[in-house]
Image (cartoon, rainbow, N blue to C red):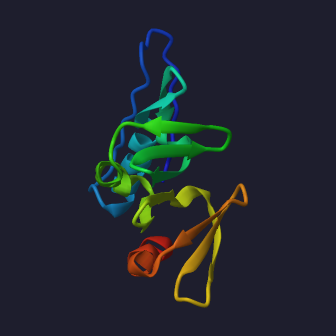
Amino acid sequence: MKISIEEVKECEEVEIIIRCPIQNQDINKIIELLEHDSIKLQCKKERDIYQVNIVDIYYIETIDEKTFAYSRDDVYEVSKKLYELEKKLNSHGFIRISKSCLLNLEYLDHIRALLNGKYEATLLNQEKLIISRKYITDFKKAFEG
């Protein structure tokens, strides 16, 4: 693979051109990564509304019928339901790990089995989340591949 960068002073926005003999799974993965970096989620913190990049979100959780997005330093309220976010974000590295939680696999450090068939996920910031038995099969598929 050859990577070239051309600086054009008159250019108003970044344009990415991929030249390839055939669009295969590797090319699709590159496109997905490029698109992933630009997806934002509208979130609320106190009275302010923010556009939070999904790459900054560690996990999303529903508590008492309210949905929250957790970043490294902040917690935001999200107006969408968890199932809506799951549909929107599942192709961007988010996986459901329990009835009330979506995890961004980019921030997963490690997992360990618990005695009751559940797993404990430790994030890069050392926060721990429980992966329930119902979601462990799908989680393992996403985690391994």
The residue shown at (29%, 49%) is 84
Quadrant position of residue 67: top left
Examine the rendered structure and indicate whether residue 66 appears above or below residue 28.
Answer: above
Q: Is residue 50 left or right of residue 138?
A: right
Q: Is residue 19 left or right of residue 145?
A: left
Pick whichever, 115 or 26, lies toward us.
Answer: 115
Residue 43, image x and y in percent? 46, 32
Q: Is residue 128 left or right of residue 94?
A: right
Residue 141, image x and y in percent? 41, 77
Residue 51, image x and y in percent? 46, 28
Examine the rendered structure and indicate whether residue 138 appears above or below residue 29.
Answer: below
Quadrant position of residue 57: top right
The residue shown at (53%, 21%) is 7
Pick whichever, 144 or 15, lies toward us.
Answer: 144
Pick whichever, 64 or 37, lies toward us.
Answer: 64
Examine the rendered structure and indicate whether residue 18 appears above or below residue 50.
Answer: below
Residue 21 visible in image = yes
Placement of the C terminus among the 4 image quadrants: bottom left
Q: Residue furthest right?
A: 126
Quadrant position of residue 138: bottom left
Pick whichever, 53 or 127, lies toward us.
Answer: 127
Residue 132, image x and y in percent? 47, 76
